[in-house]
Image (tube, helix red, strand yellow):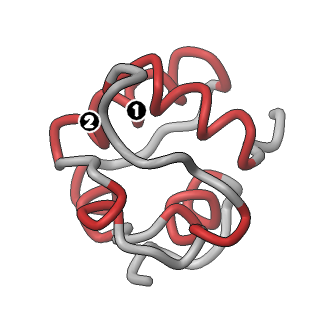
Amino acid sequence: MASLGIEDLRRILVACAGADEGAELTDAALDTPFEELGYDSLALMETAAAIQQEFGIELPDEDVAGARTPRALLRLANGGARAGG
């Protein structure tokens, strides 16, 4: 299974939420809550579905909802501890 990187996450978020929605996802924004970056829960659920389709990584809805930051979602997708950060 491939590892999900920040560039992959950025690309998928833009594809799911649209280029005009959300702030630019950079290394400096890894610990910024998705809400502050302009991404809502629907965008995150769509992102999780795209991650599953492209990378074969299953992300339970409740875990995605608990991933408050890009770093937490990357950690979750790459097999780290359950979300919550």
How far across and down, in percent of the image, does residue 38 sit?
A: 27, 51
Q: Dot 1: few (<14), some (14–19), or many (≥20) neighbours within 10 Å?
A: many
Q: How many marks?
A: 2
Give the Cα distance between marks 1 and 2. Answer: 6 Å
Toward the viewer: 74 or 81? 74
| The C terminus lies in quadrant | bottom left
- Relative to residue 77, is residue 76 depicted above or below? below
Q: Secondary structure at mark 2?
A: helix
Q: Please report the residue visible at 42 percent of the width from the left and 22 percent of the height from the top.
A: 19
Q: Is residue 46 left or right of residue 78?
A: left
Give the quarter of the image for residue 15: top left
Q: Nearer the viewer, residue 58 or 18?
A: 18
Q: Do callouts 1 and 2 mark residues in contact (Cβ within 8 Å)?
A: yes
Say which residue appears at 72% left-offset and 48% top-offset: 6
Q: Is residue 14 above or below residue 61?
A: above
Kindly identify the residue that appears in the image at 16 percent across and 37 percent down. 42
The label shown at residue 43 is: 2
Q: Amino acid at mark 1?
A: Thr
Q: Is residue 66 above or below residue 19?
A: below
Q: Secondary structure at mark 1?
A: helix
Residue 45 falls in which quadrant of the image?
Answer: top left
Q: Which residue is mark 1?
A: 47
Task: Identify the mark at residue 26; answer none if there is no mark.
Answer: none
Where is residue 24? Give x, y as percent: 53, 46
Identity, as a three-letter code, of the amino acid under mark 2: Ala
At label 2, counting other C-alpha atoms closer than 10 Å, the crowd grade (few under 14, some 14-19, many 20 or more) is: many
